[in-house]
Amino acid sequence: MKICITPREGLYQVLAAVFDAFDRVPTVAELGVLKGDNALQLHQALRPEQLLLVDAWSAASNAAYCPFEQLPPWVTPVAEYAYYYGGPMDDPQTWERLYQSCASKFEGHSEVSLIRQDSYSAYETVRQRVAGRGLDLLYVDANHQYEYVLRDLMTYQDLVRPDGLLMLNDCCHSEKGARQNLGVLEALGSFIKRSDFVPVAMTNTDWTDVVLARKGSHMVEAIDTVLVNADIPFVELPHQLITAARIRNGRLGANLSFC
């Protein structure tokens, strides 16, 4: 597993080079889209044959923020993140604006489909859209609580081609993440024990991104080859250490620690 000194966009360029090497125009899905900013980066970097964007864009998603009626003192109330969403979290208009913001980014792009359902409900729709082909890349960024992330991974893994890839966002422990009750890293740790996926690359950033491939897939070697020959510095660690990943913040920014 390579810890890469690059932002998420750097990994997108790596994946683009890998797909180009196999002369493949990828089919991509993103679970959790919000304003569509990351989806736009995926679209620009990978030039996919098909891009499926799945998000409920609904205030109902707030209910899954924490399983307890009374928030624990170490979890920040979801309403305090209204600034990020552009309006009150319980206002349907906030979510409608987010949906429209995303839709406007892809006007005129027939290869892009917006699926307005939560990730679990959308599974059958996505399955039908990729039937006979499968997904080359699944980007998982929907509900970030442990049970929901694990459910997305376990549910959608069969739609990913044998030589396809998974990518996760916010996959590290940090003080900010703990305040949001994030469980992505913990879900990943459970998932790799239950599947044949292994992490092969991750960003040395806060809100870390991780790329996973199946054991024995030629994608493992392909990503290794591209990174070794790219201008992206990295250090390599056994992938089994990933669940220890945490953020250490310093004067010049954030770094990953496994100690």
Image (tube, helix red, strand yellow):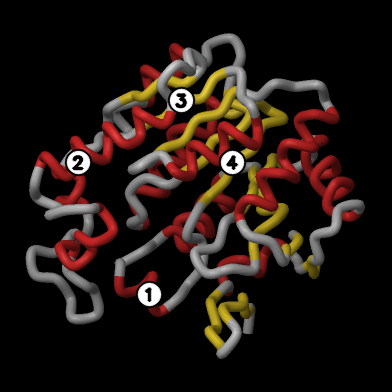
Cα separation, mark 2 vs mark 1, equals: 23 Å
Tell me the element at label 3. Answer: strand
Q: Mark 2 points at which residue?
A: 95
**Comes first in the chain, label 4 or label 2:** 2
Residue 43 horizontal side relative to residue 162, left or right: left
Q: For the residue marked with disc 4, what is the amino acid?
A: Leu
Spatial CA span between label 3 and label 1 = 29 Å
Vertical placement of residue 29 versus 95, above or below? above
Q: In this view, does 77 lie to the left or right of 162?
A: left
Q: What element carries label 4?
A: strand
Which disc number belongs to residue 176? 1
Tell me what residue is drawn at x 30 percent, y 67 percent.
Answer: 180
Q: Mark 3 highlights which residue?
A: 52
Residue 140 at x, y percent in the picture: 47, 43
**In 3D space, how far apart are the residues under numbered discs 4 and 2 (Cα atoms)?**
27 Å
First-in-chain label (4 vs 3): 3
Name the secondary structure under disc 1: helix
Q: In this view, does 114 lie to the left or right of 234?
A: left
Q: Which of 195 and 150 is in front in this view?
A: 150
Q: Name the residue under label 4.
A: 166
Between marks 4 and 2 in the image, the one whose residue lies nearer the viewer: 2
Q: Distance between the residues labelled 4 and 3?
A: 14 Å
Give the secondary structure at mark 2. Answer: helix
Residue 101 appears in which quarter of the rendering?
top left
* Marks 2/3: CA–CA distance: 19 Å
Of the pair 123 and 53, the residue shown nearer to us: 53
Q: Nearer the viewer, residue 194 or 3?
A: 3
Sequence order check, earlier mark of 2 and 3 = 3
- Local packing at callout 2 (Cα closer than 10 Å; few below 14, some 14-19, many 20+) is many
